[in-house]
Image: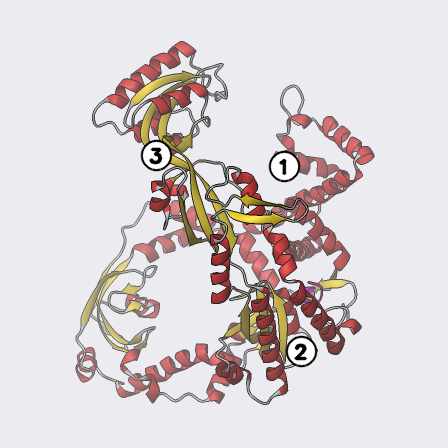
């Protein structure tokens, strides 16, 4: 009813929007281009080290992945997931082809049967439970003859299994060359266990105000050029937007509240066809609640009994206190005005219980690992019942240690449940005994030691609901407001932000959007806006209005970033602190050259501090922070010797070695060598692929298609 009413009341604005949208299409020339990119670039989705990735092949992978994807995954998330897999497979396949790594036809069956999902499938096992190649081949032949679509899926699965086997061979070859000698194990041991104690004085960089250090644009540019890897950037865009949200006005809310209140009481209505006047019962008096709510409410009659915890928290006490037949409302909850009527109440209608299940061979759903007889189970249950009733026994611990039920990890907690949810004997026990009672009941699942933890009253409410939505007038005004702002922003000389400020609209910026981004802060999934921002025909400063869920967004493109090195303006936030620290270090060192530690401390109003038990692997100095160069320098000093000035991470140091404690010699260092080797081997797959990916020549055209 409410949906049809919304459609009827918005007919005018829908016609207006459609007409204006068609007009916008004509004037913007959309009829002359295929999409936001101005037309697809052939059928190549990407090129990876000279290998073309066909868009048709990619789409077939997307289609297959979508059938197996988790619910809630957006189209673009699916595209990016498949792309990452295609990229990885292509780069690694190129390497494996160069090395001659392949799985021959006669080896494929050996690879396939090593896949647990196949080898452990009873359909492909013989009477001894072993993989049977003949059964498997027979299955494939049947699939090929009678289910070509499933056979095609199998071929894709087969390729994935073979690819995984080839990758394993490739990475194993690399791992074979990744080792660690006993000498490396010894070094690793000493780096972690050799210790030094030092005295130090430090002039922190923070002692010099940033305002006294002047860094020019040329200096920033020189630093960027000297460190190109650190300042590479992808193509990106900045936008700013004003969001016109479709939401109910104060007048709309008042009208909705008045309308729902008007449904409370009976009304007299004249029926012309019968020439009679009838009294139509209102919500307060109607005896046909389901039919009344179906006609007048935005939510149907919910006949389920609810405990207090299931009701809106703000109104739960009031609703639970209603007598049968009483009403409460209108009240505002979850974007709607509501009036609730108490239909029925049940005292102690919801029980919270915990149990310990002692199962036996032959009981329903018994774990095959349970071998006890019914008599043994009964005896064990009696022992546990006596234990559970002892003072000081923690029932949850007893359940965790002894229960055969799936709730054992939760201490036997079954949560709250209502009448009829549990098996009959268990249900009767739970509802007929008081809170705190511990007893035993036998069901088809075994013996249960049950503890009644809590009971709650439950109620059945009928709730009349009207969603709080914008009226047709409000929607029309919003459309007009958004259109006027767009026209003013595109036809006047007034800057976008200034115009928004004049109209008291909030401008929200979104920076560094990537070509394959989808979600925009404040707007959600808005792929169309991202495509527009990257369209070759969109120029810096361009403005466009987008129809989005629950309103409109007027968007301006404010910055374009090319692929390559960052501009000085973009990198300055990162580079300035680095260069300032360098200049501060130079100043401190030039002012303190040749000074002893005591002079260095005295002239800078410092005190000499002590730091003990420092190691190379944990080079953190209390009060100063992580200082690997300072700690490393300490290990190179003779006892009692002082260092020169050291440019540290947090300041300039002078240190003196007070003592050094070498770790005890071990008989051998095989444990540390093995640990190093395992650690290095574990990183092979990720680091090798990342290195290959970084060196790969990748032309990614996904943004032209998605």
What residue is at 51 percent from the left and 66 percent from the top?
A: 522
Mark 3: secondary structure: strand
Q: Of tags 2 and 3, which is closer to the observer?
A: 3
In the depicted structure, whether residue 101 falls above or below residue 411? below
Q: CA distance from mark 2 to mark 1?
A: 51 Å
In primary-sequence order, the first of circles 2 and 1 is: 1
**Does residue 73 show up?**
no
Asked which colour scheme the image uses, the reply is secondary structure
In the depicted structure, whether residue 667 falls above or below residue 224? above
What residue is at 75 percent from the left and 39 percent from the top?
A: 150
In primary-sequence order, the first of circles 1 and 3 is: 1
Q: Which residue is mark 1?
A: 115
Q: Residues within 10 Å of mark 3 (few under 14, many from 20)?
A: some
What residue is at 37 percent from the left and 13 percent from the top?
A: 378
Please identify the quadrant where the C terminus is shown. Answer: bottom right
Q: Residue furthest top?
A: 375
Mark 2: secondary structure: loop
In the depicted structure, whether residue 592 falls above or below residue 278? below
Q: Residues within 10 Å of mark 2 (few under 14, many from 20)?
A: some
């Amino acid at each position: 009813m409410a949906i049809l009413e919304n459609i009827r009341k918005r007919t005018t604005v829908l016609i207006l929007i459609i007409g204006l949208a068609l007009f916008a299409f004509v004037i913007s020339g959309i009829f002359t281009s295929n999409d936001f990119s101005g037309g697809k670039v052939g059928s190549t989705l990407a090129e990876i080290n000279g290998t073309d990735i066909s868009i048709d092949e990619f789409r077939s992978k997307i289609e297959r992945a979508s059938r197996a994807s988790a619910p809630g995954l957006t189209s673009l998330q699916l595209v990016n997931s498949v792309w990452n897999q295609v990229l990885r497979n292509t780069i690694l396949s190129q390497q494996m082809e160069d090395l001659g790594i392949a799985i021959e036809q006669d080896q494929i069956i050996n690879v396939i049967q090593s896949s647990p999902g196949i080898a452990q499938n009873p359909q492909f096992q013989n009477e001894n439970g072993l993989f049977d190649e003949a059964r498997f081949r027979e299955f494939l032949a049947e699939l090929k003859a009678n289910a070509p679509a499933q056979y095609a899926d199998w071929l894709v699965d087969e390729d994935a299994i073979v690819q995984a086997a080839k990758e394993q061979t490739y990475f194993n070859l690399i791992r074979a060359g990744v080792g660690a000698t006993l000498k490396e194990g010894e070094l690793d041991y000493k780096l972690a266990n050799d210790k030094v104690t030092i005295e130090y004085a430090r002039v922190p960089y923070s002692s010099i105000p940033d305002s006294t250090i002047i860094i020019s644009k040329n200096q920033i540019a020189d630093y960027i050029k000297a460190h190109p890897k650190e300042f590479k950037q992808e193509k990106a865009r900045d936008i700013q937007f004003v969001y016109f949200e479709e939401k109910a006005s104060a007048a709309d809310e008042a009208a909705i509240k008045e309308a729902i209140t008007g449904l409370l009481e009976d009304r007299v209505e004249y029926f012309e066809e019968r020439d009679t006047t009838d009294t139509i019962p209102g919500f307060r008096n109607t005896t046909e609640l389901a039919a009344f709510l179906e006609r007048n409410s935005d939510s149907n009659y919910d006949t389920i009994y609810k405990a207090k915890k299931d009701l809106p928290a703000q109104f739960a006490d009031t609703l639970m206190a209603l007598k049968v037949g009483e009403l409460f409302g209108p009240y505002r909850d979850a974007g709607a005005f509501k009036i609730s009527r108490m239909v029925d109440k049940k005292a102690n209608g919801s029980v919270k219980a915990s149990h310990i299940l002692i199962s036996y061979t032959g009981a329903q759903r018994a774990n095959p690992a349970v071998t006890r007889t019914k008599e043994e189970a009964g005896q064990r249950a009696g022992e546990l019942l006596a234990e559970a009733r002892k003072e000081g026994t923690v029932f949850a611990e007893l359940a965790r240690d002894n229960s055969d039920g799936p709730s054992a990890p939760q201490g036997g907690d079954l949560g709250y449940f209502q009448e009829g949810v549990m098996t009959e004997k268990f249900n009767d026990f739970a509802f007929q005994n008081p809170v705190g009672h511990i007893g035993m009941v036998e069901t088809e699942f075994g013996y249960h030691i049950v503890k009644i933890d809590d009971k709650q009253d439950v109620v059945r409410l009928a709730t009349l609901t009207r969603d709080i939505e914008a009226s047709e007038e409000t929607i029309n005004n919003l459309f007009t407001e958004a259109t006027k702002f767009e026209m003013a922003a595109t036809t006047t000389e007034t800057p976008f932000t200034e115009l928004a400020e004049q109209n008291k609209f909030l401008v929200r910026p979104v920076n560094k959007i990537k070509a394959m981004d989808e979600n925009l802060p404040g707007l959600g999934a808005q792929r169309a806006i991202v495509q527009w921002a990257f369209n070759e025909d969109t120029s810096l400063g361009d403005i466009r209005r987008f129809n989005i869920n629950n309103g409109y967004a007027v968007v301006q493109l404010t910055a374009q970033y090319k692929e390559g090195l960052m501009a000085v303006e973009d990198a300055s936030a990162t580079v300035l602190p680095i260069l300032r620290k360098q200049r501060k270090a130079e100043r401190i060192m030039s002012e303190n050259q040749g000074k002893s530690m005591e002079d260095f401390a005295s002239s800078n109003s410092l005190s000499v501090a002590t730091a003990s038990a420092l190691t190379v692997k944990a080079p953190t100095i209390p009060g100063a922070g992580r200082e690997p160069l300072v700690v490393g320098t300490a290990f190179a000093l003779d006892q009692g010797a002082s260092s020169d000035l050291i440019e540290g991470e947090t300041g300039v140091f002078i240190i003196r070695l007070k003592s050094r404690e070498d770790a005890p010699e071990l008989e051998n260092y095989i444990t540390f060598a093995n640990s190093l080797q395992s650690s290095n081997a574990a990183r092979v797959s990720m680091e090798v692929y990342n290195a290959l990916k970084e060196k790969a020549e990748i032309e990614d055209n996904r943004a032209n298609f998605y």
